[in-house]
């Protein structure tokens, strides 16, 4: 009798979990190192986060390929939508029912433009991320049928985070870069936005119907740029100018696309403002510093890579930046809290909690 009770309990738990998995919407992630959760581990590239101390605060305390001390932005979004974290598309574990959770296609080092991040050699550029998304849809169709697969993608939440590297790892990578000789900054921004628009339309054509589109952070204020370009700890004016041109144009482009498509497909996420709040007043958010990275070396711990030989802060929660470019786990959580409940200053035309409420009625 006791064994029967155990079997019934286990069966109930399994059915409950299965229903929860079915109920949670799928989640797809595209973009760069801010959202990569391990695809680059499977590639021959220097743009990797697969060695300690990366992952020091992850539940396993091991590096996962996330450019974080722990969870990254997609992880916290998965928690908000009641889903388990997505696996990297290149992970051999992404098979069977795990495909129904979604997938992460992001790859550190990439940009909107195909010539961004050339120094990293073997990375998954945006066109390739979309090819993998098509391949993913074929795999899911083989699993649950074409109509169900189409529905899964249409009802999914999508995150795309790309654009920062087009400045940091392209236009401003070296003095007199090819792109800076080709374009004055305002013209370059216009060009990147026009190419980004094509990417968003491709996503729409691939079935995406709810897409969170993040702007760049305050590019000139990350520890790497303070170390390279700042003599007095002030943000780099030139990179701030780039972010200041790019982000408002991105929002206008998204408004135009939604108007053209007749629906609020694309949601603009003002990560620049959210992050800038930490930078101008770190103490108000419980951070001791927003200038010095927790892990690194040189001025502001902003030079080179975060490695086992780097300086490492004992308490990651009081640093806004984990490494020279990437927010700490706690900062990532705050960014996602803003995505979830932020006003239209941060989320246009609506935040994630509104999206979830609207879509639950459909």
Image: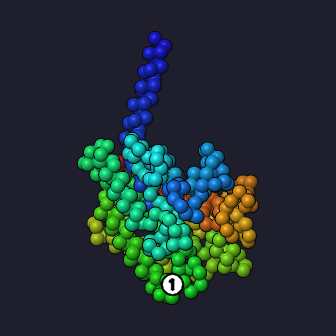
For this view, does 153 lie left or right of residue 189? left
Please determine whether, in this image, residue 80 is positioned above or below residue 168: above
Residue 203 place in picture, x, y as percent: 35, 63
Colouring used for the render: rainbow
**Furthest residue in direction left, as rendered:** 147
Q: Residues within 10 Å of mark 1 (few under 14, many from 20)?
A: few
Please determine whether, in this image, residue 334 is positioned above or below residue 325: above
Which residue corresponds to the image point at 67% horizontal and 77% vertical from the top-left? Answer: 228
User: Mark 1 falls on what kind of element?
Assistant: helix
Residue situated in front as seen by the camera: 23 or 121: 121
Occupied quadrant, residue 316: bottom right
Residue 330 seen in this snapshot: no
Residue 287 place in picture, x, y as percent: 68, 60
Residue 191 place in picture, x, y as percent: 42, 80
Which residue corresponds to the image point at 42% horizontal and 25% vertical from the top-left? Answer: 11
Residue situated in front as seen by the camera: 57 or 309: 309
Which residue corresponds to the image point at 64% horizontal and 74% vertical from the top-left? Answer: 225
- For mark 1, what is the residue? 178
The total number of labels drawn is 1
**Furthest residue in direction top, as rendered:** 1
Residue situated in front as seen by the camera: 166 or 321: 166
For this view, does 341 lie left or right of residue 134? right
Which residue corresponds to the image point at 38% horizontal and 77% vertical from the top-left? Answer: 194
Residue 147 place in picture, x, y as percent: 25, 48
Residue 92 seen in this snapshot: yes
């Amino acid at each position: 009798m006791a064994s029967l009770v155990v079997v019934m309990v286990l069966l109930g738990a399994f059915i409950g979990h299965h229903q929860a998995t079915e109920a949670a919407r799928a989640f797809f992630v595209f973009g760069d190192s801010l959202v990569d959760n391990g695809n680059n581990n499977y590639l021959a590239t220097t743009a990797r986060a697969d060695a300690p101390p990366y992952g020091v605060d992850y539940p396993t305390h091991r590096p996962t390929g996330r450019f974080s001390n722990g969870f990254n932005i997609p992880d916290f979004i998965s928690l908000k939508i009641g889903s388990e974290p997505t696996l990297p598309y290149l992970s051999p574990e992404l098979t069977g029912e795990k495909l129904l959770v979604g997938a992460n296609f992001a790859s550190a080092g990439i940009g909107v433009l195909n010539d961004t991040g050339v120094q990293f050699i073997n990375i998954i550029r945006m066109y390739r991320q979309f090819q993998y998304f098509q391949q993913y849809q074929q795999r899911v169709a083989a699993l649950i049928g074409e109509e169900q697969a189409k529905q899964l993608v249409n009802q999914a939440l999508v995150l795309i985070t790309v654009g920062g590297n087009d400045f940091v790892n392209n236009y401003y990578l070296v003095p007199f870069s090819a792109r800076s000789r080709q374009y004055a900054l305002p013209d370059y921004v216009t060009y990147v936005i026009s190419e980004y628009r094509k990417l968003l339309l491709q996503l729409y054509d691939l079935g995406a119907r709810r897409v969170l589109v993040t702007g760049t952070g305050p590019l000139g204020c990350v520890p790497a740029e303070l170390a390279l370009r700042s003599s007095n700890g002030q943000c780099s004016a030139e990179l701030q100018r780039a972010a200041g041109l790019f982000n408002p144009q991105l929002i206008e482009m998204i408004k135009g696309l939604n108007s053209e498509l007749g629906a609020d497909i694309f949601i603009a996420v003002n990560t620049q403002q959210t992050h800038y709040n930490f930078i101008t007043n770190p103490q108000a958010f419980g951070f001791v510093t927003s200038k010095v990275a927790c892990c690194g070396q040189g001025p502001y711990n902003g030079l080179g890579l975060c490695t086992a030989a780097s300086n490492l802060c004992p308490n990651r929660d009081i640093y806004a930046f984990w490494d020279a470019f990437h927010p700490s786990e706690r900062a990532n959580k705050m960014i996602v809290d803003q995505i979830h409940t932020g006003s239209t200053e941060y989320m246009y035309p609506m935040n994630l909690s509104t999206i979830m409420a609207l879509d639950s009625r459909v």
